[in-house]
């Protein structure tokens, strides 16, 4: 096999913008689990999508081979369910025994897993480049001893039988591949390429890889280049794995979450001593292959009993792992931005809604809050779109666990300098009343 090419060298991008990012659990309880009525023993890795004001979720599910023998599981499948919001709380429809039919050319022996979804906007430009919008699902075909990154597509994402495989092997020059997070070029973002950030630092070794695609065309060209790598003596020293697709921020840069693991956490599961945590990066808006900032401390770490999962009831202890992220349909209505980031970061705050795998067994919900000191002109807003600009306070009763907020100054290529603004393991285990203040548009 010939060696893979490396990405052409480009001038480093620098930025003077300071970003702040925080994670806040929506609840101290799972939103999806067998105990809550789901058919499957384990309901975990999940991807999110939006269509026609509805939110769908594709969930990796799995059963034990024998209910009396822990940790020995059968093949994994993907199943489709829904998310609804009510007064700041999140509800997921329990999974059923109906699984998705992706019209695969073969059925992998150990199933399919690791879903990631991205919406590819259509193009009606005057050029020859015209194509319809679609929802594209990247997933891992698991042959037990080998994993292969595959892709499917649909125009009707809520139809379990409406997805068709478009690539059985997205990266055919790799002996193994998994966990692909695409970022598609569009008329709005004006990117020159489609991007695919993929891998779990086993493949490619030590980091997250980069592949490039041509807008409007199926397929990616693989490169022997990395978006970023594991770091010694950090929360991501042992393993890093791509999270959900990058989302554009109001600065023009991109938020890209990832999952990082470290060793040293003894558990009841044989031969398992890792802890998975959430990390984040900020990617340059004009060239997303360049990392402007990266979290020095975990954005979120296993804290609650069902995240730690240190009993045979759970599949994998000490795991929080994110695979789905969308703009929060409620904006920042149910987040106290001042408390999380500071009053000076209210105006530029953006809120995202994510679902995360806990102990490879349940699904939890989290809000990711991002802001910056960038000089951004904001259009007048209404109370429905944000609560950081209203004179009338909104009282929201919600159960939360607050995680670390990290401030990072963007300078590339030197390593980022970060300052924590709250302890990474702070717990708020009681119900609290959050007062969110905004300003009514005049």
Image (cartoon, helix red, strand yellow):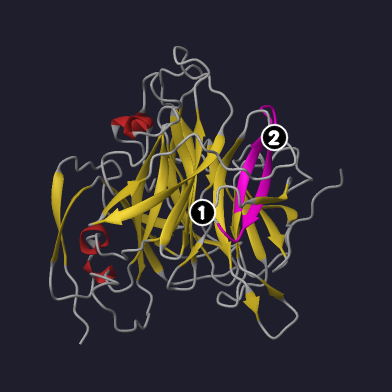
In percent of width and height, residue 299 lies at 37, 48
Secondary structure under tag 1 reads: loop
Residue 154 is inside the magenta segment? yes
User: What residue is at 74 percent from the left and 53 percent from the top?
Assistant: 222
Secondary structure under tag 2 reads: loop
Of all residues, the one furthest to the top in this rendering is 68
Q: Which mark is residue 107?
A: 2
Of all residues, the one furthest to the right in this rendering is 2
User: What residue is at 55 percent from the left and 52 percent from the top?
Assistant: 159
- Mark 2 and mark 1 lie on one chain; the one further toward the N terminus is 2
Range covered by the magenta-colored residues: 137-156
Compared to residue 38, the image places residue 182 above or below, namely below
Compared to residue 27, the image places residue 326 above or below, namely below
User: What residue is at 49 percent from the left and 16 percent from the top?
Assistant: 270
User: What residue is at 36 percent from the left and 83 percent from the top?
Assistant: 377
In percent of width and height, residue 148 lies at 69, 40
In percent of width and height, residue 367 lies at 34, 54
Compared to residue 23, the image places residue 108 above or below, namely above
The quadrant of the picture occupied by the C terminus is: bottom left
Give the side of residue 292 with respect to residue 407, left or right.
Answer: right
Q: Residues within 10 Å of mark 2 (few under 14, many from 20)?
A: few
Q: Which mark is residue 158?
A: 1
The quadrant of the picture occupied by the N terminus is: top right
Give the side of residue 150 with respect to residue 60, left or right.
Answer: right
């Amino acid at each position: 096999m010939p060696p893979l090419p490396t990405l052409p060298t480009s001038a480093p991008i620098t930025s003077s913008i300071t970003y702040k990012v925080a994670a806040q659990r929506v609840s101290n309880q799972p939103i999806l689990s067998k105990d809550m009525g789901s058919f499957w023993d384990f309901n975990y890795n999940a991807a999110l999508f939006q269509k026609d004001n509805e939110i769908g979720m594709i969930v990796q599910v799995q059963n034990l081979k024998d209910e009396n023998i822990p940790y020995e599981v059968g093949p994994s499948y993907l199943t489709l369910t829904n998310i609804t919001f009510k007064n700041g709380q999140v509800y997921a429809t329990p999974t059923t025994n109906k699984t998705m039919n992706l019209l695969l050319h073969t059925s992998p022996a150990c199933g399919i897993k690791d879903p990631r979804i991205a919406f590819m906007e259509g193009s009606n430009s005057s050029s020859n480049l015209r194509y319809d919008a679609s929802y594209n699902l990247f997933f891992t075909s698991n042959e037990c001893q080998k994993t292969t990154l595959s892709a499917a597509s649909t125009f009707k994402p809520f139809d379990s039988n409406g997805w068709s495989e478009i690539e059985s092997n997205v990266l055919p020059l790799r002996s193994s591949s998994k966990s692909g997070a695409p970022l598609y070029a569009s008329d709005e973002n004006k990117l020159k390429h489609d991007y695919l950030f993929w891998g779990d630092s086993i493949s490619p070794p030590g980091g997250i890889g980069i592949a490039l695609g041509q807008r409007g065309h199926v397929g990616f060209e693989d490169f022997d280049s990395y978006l970023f790598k594991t770091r010694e003596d950090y929360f991501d020293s042992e393993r890093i794995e791509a999270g959900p697709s990058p989302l554009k921020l109001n600065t023009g840069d991109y938020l890209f979450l990832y999952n990082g693991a470290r060793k040293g956490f003894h558990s009841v599961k044989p031969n398992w001593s890792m802890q998975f945590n959430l990390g984040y990066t900020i990617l340059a808006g004009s060239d997303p292959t360049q990392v402007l900032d990266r979290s020095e401390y975990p954005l979120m770490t296993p804290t609650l009993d069902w995240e730690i999962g240190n009993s045979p009831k759970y599949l994998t202890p000490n795991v929080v792992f994110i695979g789905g992220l969308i703009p929060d349909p409620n904006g920042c209505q149910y987040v106290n931005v001042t408390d999380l980031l500071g009053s000076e970061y209210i105006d530029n705050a953006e809120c995202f809604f994510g679902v995360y795998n806990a102990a490879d067994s349940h699904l939890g919900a989290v809000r990711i809050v991002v802001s910056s000191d960038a000089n951004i002109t904001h259009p007048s807003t209404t109370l429905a779109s944000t609560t950081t600009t209203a004179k009338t306070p909104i009282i929201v009763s919600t159960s939360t666990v607050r995680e670390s907020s990290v401030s990072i100054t963007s300078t590339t290529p030197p390593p980022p300098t970060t300052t924590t603004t709250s302890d990474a393991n702070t717990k708020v285990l009681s119900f609290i009343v959050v007062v969110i203040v905004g300003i009514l548009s005049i």
